[in-house]
Image (spheres, rainbow, N blue to C red):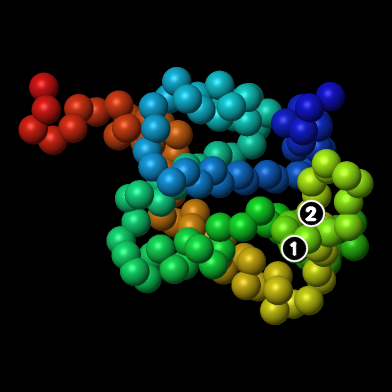
Amino acid sequence: MNVAHQQHLAITHGLKVSRLFIFRERGPQTAIGAMIAAQQLAAIEVRILAAHDLSPPDDLMTLARYSVNRGISEDENGGFLVTSRDSREVPMMHGKAGTWEVLSYRHDDVEEARYGFKKLWSWSQTPEEYFAFSSAPAPGGS
């Protein structure tokens, strides 16, 4: 069972999942359309942000700070936690890669993650908006 299917099952029981895809440059629907469609079929709210469209330097600094592999979750007791990946070197078996999974219930960590997600979300586009723009002809082109 893939992650999108597992999340779809959780969504049918009241979970809300919002996923933000961040790309360095705008790309055509053919490159990521199937992945986005699978997320949407699972009832996951999807938005897309192309870093190339942001204004330097403040927006790019904000993007660098908050565009980490991070999730904000609510536990069964109503408390919030942040999950993130820490890519520092970890002891591994020969030839294996890995990361630490970091969990934090600290209020300031949760609020910072929420702020960053909301900021990036506000700059993002729906897949329909994103793909309509990226498939439009370039200015001055035919």
- Tell me what residue is drawn at x 44 percent, y 68 percent: 61
| Residues at marks 2 and 1 touching, judged by CB atoms closer than 8 Å | yes
The kind of secondary structure element at disc 1 is loop
Is residue 74 visible in the rendered image? The answer is no
98 or 11, which is in the foreground? 98
| Residue 27 location (% of width, % of height) | 39, 32
Q: Disc 2 designates what residue?
A: 99
Left or right: where 140 falls relative to 120: left
- Quadrant the C terminus occupies: top left
Crowd band around label 1 with a 10 angstrom C-alpha radius: few (<14), some (14–19), many (20+): few
Q: Pick the residue in front: 85 or 70.
A: 85
Q: Which image quadrant: the N terminus?
A: top right
Does residue 5 lie above or below 108 as drawn?
above
Per the image, label 2 sits on a secondary structure element best described as loop
- Asked whether, in this view, residue 96 is left or right of residue 119, the answer is right
Task: Decide which of tag 2 and tag 1 comes sooner along the chain.
Answer: 1
User: In which quarter of the view is residue 134 placed?
Assistant: top left
Give the x, y percent position of residue 15. 76, 44
| Residue at point 83%, 43% (across, down) | 96
Instruction: Identify the residue under disc 1.
Output: 88
| Residue drawn where x is 64% and y is 66% of the image | 113
In this rendering, the answer to whether 37 lies above or below 22 is above
Q: Quadrant of residue 79?
A: bottom right
